[in-house]
Image (cartoon, grey):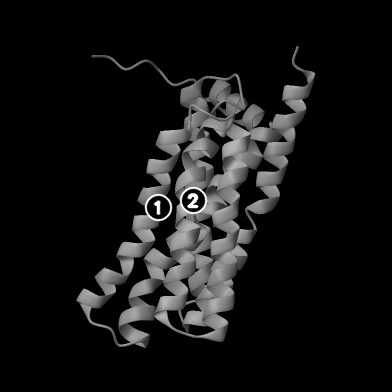
Amino acid sequence: LAFPPIHLLPLLAGYGQLLSNRRFVAGSAALGLVGLPLIGWIGLSPVLLIHDEGLSTLAYALWQLPVFGGLILGNLIINHIADRHPLPTLVRGALWPYVAGLCLMVVATWVWPSVISLVAGLSLYALGLGIANAVLYRMTLFASTQSKGLVSAMLGMITIALLGLGGALLAMIGAGASLLLFAVAASVAGGLALWPLWSLLRARSAQAAVMP
C-alpha cells in the first residue's frame, strides 16, 4: 500500500498553533512534570537501594511493589469514579494524595532517613499520580480542536522531552547520593507541576464559565 505524502509546512503550522494554545501547553507541561518523581525513582532506585543501602536484588524488587501498587490503585480508583465527577474535580481530588505524598517523602525521610520513609511518601504520591494521569491526558488532548493525531503526537513529544531532561537533571544534581537528597529533589520536581496544573484548571474553569 502506498503511504500518503507528508506535507511538512502544514504539519509545522499545526504544531505552531498547538504551542500557542496555553491550555495545551499547560497540560503537556503538567503531564511531563507530574511523572518526574516516579521516573527519578525508576532510574535512581538501584543506586539508592542496592549500591547505597546495600540491599539485595530481591529486597530492591520488593520495595518497588508499594510504589507501583499505589500507581495501579490510583488507576483502579479513577476507572471506578471517572464517570461520576467533572474532570477538573477529579484532578483537584488527585492533588491531595499527590501533594501529601511529596511532603511526606521529604519530612519523613528528614526525620527518619530510611527506605520505609521514602517509599511511604512515594507510594502516596503514586496513588495521586495514578488518579490524575489519565484525566490530565484527556483534558490536554481535548484542549485543542485540531486533529487528535497531531495533538497526541505533540503531547507525547513534550511529555517525553520533559521526562527525559528532568530525569537526567535529577541524576546530574546528585539526587541518587542519599535518600534525603532524592526525596528533596523529587519533591521539588513534582512540585513544579503545580503551576501548569493551576493554569490548566483555571483555563478550564474560565472556558466553562463563558459557555452557554
- Residue lying farthest left? 58
Q: Which of 76 and 52 is in front in this view?
A: 76
Residue 26, horizontal then vertical, whole percent? 65, 41
- Crowding around mark 2 (Cα neighbors within 10 Å: few <14, some 14 to 19, many 20+) is many
Q: Whole-percent x and y of residue 98?
A: 55, 56
Q: Circle 1 sits on which residue?
A: 71
Tell me if residue 96 comes above or below residue 141 in the rendering: below
Image quadrant assignment for residue 139: top right
Q: Residue drawn 44% across and 83% down?
A: 114
Which SS class for mark 2?
Answer: helix
The amino acid beneath tag 2 is Leu
Q: How far separated are the C-alphas under marks 2 and 1? A: 7 Å
Q: Which mark is residue 129?
A: 2
Q: Residue at x 48, y 27 (%)?
A: 83
Describe the element under mark 1 as helix, strand or loop: helix
Residue 115's disc is none
